[in-house]
Amino acid sequence: MKKAPKILLAIIVLIAFFAADFYAAHNNLITDSNIFVKNDFEKTQYDHPEKVWDKVFFGNSVVISAYQEKESISGYINCGLDYGVVTDLWEMIDEGYIKIGSELVIGLNYLTLYDDFETNPTYIWHKKWYQPYAYFERDRFYPLITGCFTRAINGESIPPMTYGYQEKAIYHGRVSDTALEKKLEEYETEFFSKPIEDYSENLKALENVIEYCNDNNIRVRAVHMPWNPTFKKPQLIKDVHAAADEVFNRYGVEVLDLEDEFTKECFYDTGHLNFDVGSPAFTKRIDDWL
């Protein structure tokens, strides 16, 4: 009989832990605080705390650098994610991390559809259902907790900890052609030699997103993002482009092909537009279409 209170206490502690963990996971603890470094999804959430995002422009870092949300007249949220792929978009939608109101535009390049592309592990939809939130976010929580604890036991004051307002990465100027040629040699091995089969999961996720939009009265369109004309386009990029278009044609999705539309002065590197010339030109062009 004496064990009963201890078991009851253990149950209460467990319930309290899981309740607190659930609350932290579903109340944007990191998003709403500036004592953590945010990932790109959390930065978007911070700027747009509304429950429904009416118009969304999704893509990877090339969308971040190309589309100037604050200068645009179209009203789309720049939901570009560093290392973002289409399976990220589908998981965000399917698991309820975003709710799109009326329109979705998907910005694509060869990396947005590459199955083995390493996306940011801190994106919340990568958390397994059985993982406590505190464990999933251990790389961000642990340094903060241990740092405060160490200062406390040493009798030191804990200074205000804040990273302030955090913005997504943009690019100024241009990388030299010589540096880019060297980088493209690395890409040839890392990406451009891959078979089209390595894109099947993201192509399937693209179908899932389109079907979801059709079922929920959301207008979905797509953009093939620009490629620097200084460099010959690898065959793989053409193959991925064609595979995506096959999906779009099958579902009747409107597509804007901007892959070959911008001059080299607009680019920071092979795919990222620079903030000085390329991004304003892209934003105007996409606004005219949207």
Image (cartoon, grey):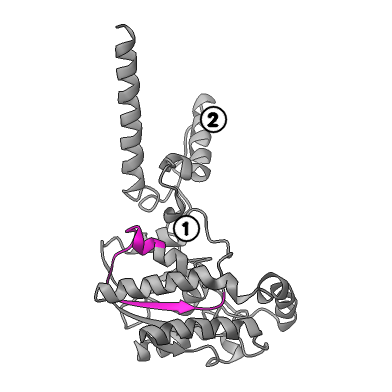
Q: Amino acid at mark 1?
A: Asn
Find disc 1 in the rendering and name its residue: 39
Q: Nearer the viewer, residue 24 or 236?
A: 236
Q: Residue at x 58, y 92 (%)?
A: 263
Q: Amino acid at mark 2?
A: Thr
Q: Is residue 22 left or right of residue 195?
A: left
Q: Residue at x 65, y 85 (%)?
A: 235
Q: Is residue 55 visible?
A: no
Residue 160 placed where, x, y %? 44, 43
Position of the N terminus by quadrant:
top left
Find disc 2 in the rendering and name its residue: 150
Question: Secondary structure beneath disc 1?
Answer: loop
Q: Earlier in the sequence, mark 2 or mark 1?
A: 1
Q: Is residue 209 above or below residue 128?
A: below
Q: Is residue 100 above or below residue 97?
A: below
Crowding at mark 1 (Cα within 10 Å: few <14, some 14-19, many 20+): many
The magenta region covers 91-110
Instruction: Indicate whether residue 106 is drawn in magenta.
Output: yes
